[in-house]
Image (cartoon, rainbow, N blue to C red):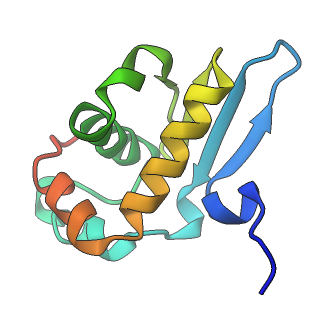
Amino acid sequence: MHDMTFEDRIAPFRWLDNEDGSAQVTLYASERYKRKLFKTRKREGFVGSGYDWESLARAFLGEKAPELQPAICFDPERLMFCAYSSDPDALRRFIVLLKEACENDRMIADIFSRTPPS
């Protein structure tokens, strides 16, 4: 088995280095990633939009990586989640931790249960 690249490790999130030294990570709603998770709270208005992902990401940061909160900014749209930072290392740590949490169904469902609607 070959070693996974960083891009493979965070997929379906996508990484982009910006010319100014900052970085961003995106996820398009069309990926349908974690759709079942969002459906568990559909009655509250969750649909898996970029705004819903921002709410989940903020709850995740607050609970699991509060030290990264000052470095991570969000700019979602309805069809796209986007997080960015002038500190690419902090953003890299955030997205790896978030992706690992997303792959742990019990952990991400627990965090999501306390996520306020967007």
* Residue 76 can be seen, yes or no: yes
**Residue pictured at 28% horizontal, 69% vertical:** 37
In this rendering, the answer to whether 82 lies above or below 97 is above
Residue 74 point in image, percent of width and height: 48, 26
Query: At x 64% / y 40%, what residue is drawn?
Result: 25
Relative height, residue 17 to residue 21 (above, below): below
Q: Is residue 106 above or below residue 66?
A: below
Residue visible at 38% across and 38% down? Answer: 54
Residue drawn where x is 49% and y is 17% of the image:
71
Left-right relation of 65 to 22: left
Q: Is residue 98 left or right of residue 116?
A: right
- Quadrant for the N terminus, please: bottom right
In the current view of this chain or complex, which residue is farthest to the right? 19
x and y percent of residue 31 in the render? Answer: 58, 67
Residue 16's x, y, as percent?
A: 78, 38
How many numbered marks does the figure carry? 0
What residue occupies the far bottom of the structure in this picture? 1
Residue 20 x %, y %: 83, 12
In this view of the protein, can residue 11 be seen by the observer?
no
Task: Tell me the quarter of the image containing the C terminus.
Answer: top left
Which of 28 and 6 lies nearest the eye of the viewer? 6
* Res. 41 image quadrant: bottom left
Q: Nearer the viewer, residue 50 or 85?
A: 85
